[in-house]
Amino acid sequence: MYFPGGARAQYVEGSEDHPLISGFPESRIPFFTELEYDEYELGLGIWDRHDGFKESIQLEGKLTRILYQVPQDLTPLEIFRNYQVALQRADFEILYAETGGELGNYGRALYDQAYFPCGVTAISRGEIGYYLEGDLNQHYLVAKTTIRDQEI
């Protein structure tokens, strides 16, 4: 993992890496939004189209959504393991991690609950739906840390 982020090719004007976690070199940002204060349901278990998340926590605070398009020579597992190891080395607590079909369709959940309601345009909806459609090669990780008495 790359701490801190550097300049990144953008599709969205004003987009940038999160100050604590950056994208891979040569990745691009096709979707970015940052809200100073909002609520968010963070999934900690399987997501079902009819029942929602099996387990989740409700969060409030600053919310940043960044979608990366990575170079095609990177596999989803390579990206997942890189973030998993980097977060553990940075003393983040892993709250939930899962891979494969056991997740349900997390891509669909993120599209329905995170991207569609926050003003994604009709053109970008198709792109995001393409990137986030779940399959057996999906990976999901939730981690947290505390910095200066602030939970992240």
Image (cartoon, rainbow, N blue to C red):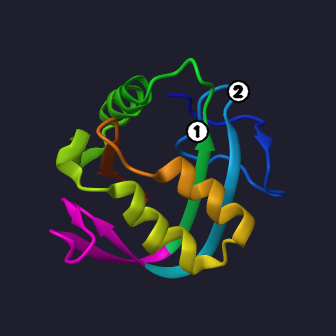
Q: Is residue 139 visible?
A: yes
Classify the position of the C terminus by image quarter. bottom left
Magenta stretch: dominant SS?
strand
Mark on residue 130? none
- Left or right side of 46 for 119: right
Residue most extreme to the right: 13
Q: Is residue 99 visible?
A: no
Residue at 38%, 49% (x, y): give it.
Answer: 134
Amino acid tagged 1: Ser
Mark 1, secondary structure of its residue: loop
Residue most extreme to the top: 73
Residue bearing mark 2: 26
Residue bearing mark 1: 22
Residue 90 position, x and y percent, is 37, 35
Looking at the image, is 33 positioned above or below residue 36? above
- Res 42 quadrant in image: bottom left
- Left or right side of 48 for 20: right
- Res 69 quadrant in image: top right
Residue 136 position, x and y percent, is 29, 39
Residue at 15%, 68% (x, y): give it.
Answer: 54
Is residue 44 in the magenta section? Answer: yes
User: What span is in magenta?
Assistant: 40-61
Q: Nearer the viewer, residue 151 or 127?
A: 127
Looking at the image, is 151 positioned above or below residue 90? below
Mark 2, secondary structure of its residue: loop
Amino acid tagged 2: Glu
Q: Residues within 10 Å of mark 1 (few under 14, many from 20)?
A: many
Residue 122 position, x and y percent, is 71, 71
